[in-house]
Image: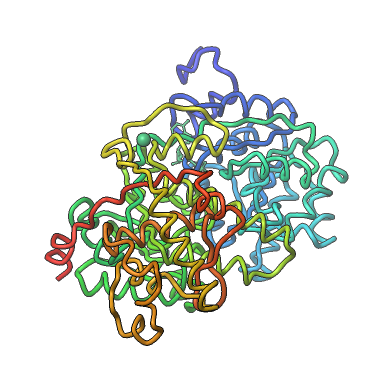
Amino acid sequence: PDRDGSGGASPAVRVLRRVFGYDAFRGPQEEIIEHVVSGGDALVLMPTGGGKSLCYQIPALVRNGVGIVVSPLIALMQDQVDALRALGVRAGFLNSTQDFEERQAVEAAFLAGELDLLYLAPERLRTESALRLLDRGTISLFAIDEAHCVAQWGHDFRPDYLTLSTLHERWPTVPRIALTATATEATHDEIAVRLNLKDARHFVASFDRPNIQYRIAPKNEPKKQLLTLLRAEHPGDAGIVYCLSRGSVEKTADFLVRSGIDALPYHAGLDSRVRAANQSRFLRDDGVVMVATIAFGMGIDKPDVRFVAHLDLPKSVEGYYQETGRAGRDGLPSTAWLAYGYQDVVQQRKMIEGSEGDDAHRRRLGSHLDAMLALCETVECRRERLLAYFGEESTPCGNCDTCLTPPASWDGTVAAQKMLSTVVRLHRERRQKFGVGQIVDILLGKKSAKVIQHDHDTLSVFGIGAELSDAEWRGVARQLLAQRLLTVEGEYGTLVLTDTSGDVLSGRRKVPLRRDPEPAKRAAKADAR
Ligand code: ADP
Ligand code: ZN
């Protein structure tokens, strides 16, 4: 008799319905699950919220033995295990937060075959005792979650992940499934090589998140711009605000709280108890805004995050995609908003210049930044750009700022030449280098104290740029920096030419620029009180 109404459904579909209560698989889930159930290795790339967990949980329930899940997210294991137990799945975890007795109980359950899933921190697998324990039980599969942690140049690199390549040698017949939401082909290949997964089948889900509206705004008064956004579009909504530094996390959280927003800070400098308390308030209460460094977010499963705001430029498109991907896991309309300005470019270029590692490493960081800048400066569909970065072709989306209010572009060649020649004159005629403020004052013909002091009003370029405003010139500088037609050096971020500046000065290269929308100054001020 067909008691549960599942008819001739496969064991995987029956588990999906009976245990998890869902009707159907999403995207490539079914194919992945069938592949792993039948013993194959898999490398799964799926965006955040795509449904990666079922891809190993169901095979672990269908196959004989215990599914071992390797995850770096120790803080979330208890929650994950509790959620599974609530569904009647026999799950446990082993990590450094447990005392001896708790660990013993889990190990005994594992050996007695009383577990379906066992979550482990990667460092456990470094110890011979843990490996011997696994030897004594029956393993149905290894799931390696957040597999991009094995990528050595990624910002989530965990050295312990490198030892996971040996799982295959010790248990050659146990299928392995590696999962990540990081999408570039390079990371992809690195995961396959480092985890010894060269023969694994690759499953790539579309990275499009159609319910997320991508917006990148020129930064003028970021905290006030943020507040305007929250009040106008997201009153009472839960969201995440990313800042680069701990200091700006604190200041921004304070500012929001003083403005009546239920905001909390999160960064690595906070006491671990405060961090845990803030995280659980964010997860459990409605409408909490978490102001955080990128230390916050990996593995956070909160479906109704309505916006992710960046007050500083992310270092890479991958980072941007991961962070914005935490919005709208429930599929409802959500906003990804980034404020971006001249200082972001200066700051990031300086950080790369001063970073540890060899030249190849710095070049890699530089090209990651360049891709991020290109996304910021594009006059075309943001989503199309974003997906193209991950190798996916698409058409203009209608749900990003550039689709909704197409920005004008203009021929900035002459403006670029004026700015570059000012930098050249200062250097050639005066042996001087200056930051953007002074260059713009000279172009505008402003007799500021610093201009008079340095006698810059006698330069032939003084006042040649009166046709643009101060803000417009800064926009030109930012875009020249983004296009590497100009660069900054030293502590003060002085402007210097690059190898390609000459092509602009000689007229061989045209410089199309994006026209920045005028800041909505008055609205922002009225709202910020
Ligand atoms: P990821 O790990 O890829 O970020 P999760 O595995 O946490 O995503 O899944 C995201 C959400 O989607 C969860 O709430 C999960 O229960 C839900 N989900 C996953 N697969 C399905 C499905 N086939 N049908 C309905 N909901 C699903
Ligand atoms: Zn678009």
Q: Is residue 397 rendered to the left or right of residue 225?
A: right
Depth check: give the residue in front, 108 or 140.
140
Is the image coloured rainbow, by chain, by secondary structure, or in one colour?
Answer: rainbow
Depth check: give the residue in front, 135 or 146.
146
Q: Is residue 524 rendered to the left or right of residue 415?
A: left
**Residue furthest to the right:** 169
For residue 489, say whether it is visible: yes
Residue under the point 24% across and 56% down:
229
Q: Is residue 3 rendered to the left or right of residue 97?
A: left
Q: For the image shown, how many numbered marks are present on the structure?
A: 0
Residue under the point 47% across and 41% down:
49
What x and y, as percent, mark residue 126?
Answer: 79, 60
The quadrant of the rendered image in which ligand 2 is seen is: top left
Residue under the point 49% across and 29% down:
18
Residue 208 vertical placement versus 377 (above, below): above
What x and y, as percent, mark residue 40?
Answer: 74, 29
Quarter of the image with the C terminus is bottom left
Depth check: give the residue in front, 518 or 296.
518
What x and y, as percent, mark residue 151?
Answer: 69, 52
For residue 80, say whether it is visible: no
Residue 439 vertical placement versus 87 (above, below): below
Q: Quadrant of residue 130?
A: bottom right
Residue under the point 65% across and 46% down:
115
Depth check: give the residue in front, 39 or 528.
528
Residue 97 vertical placement versus 38 (above, below): below
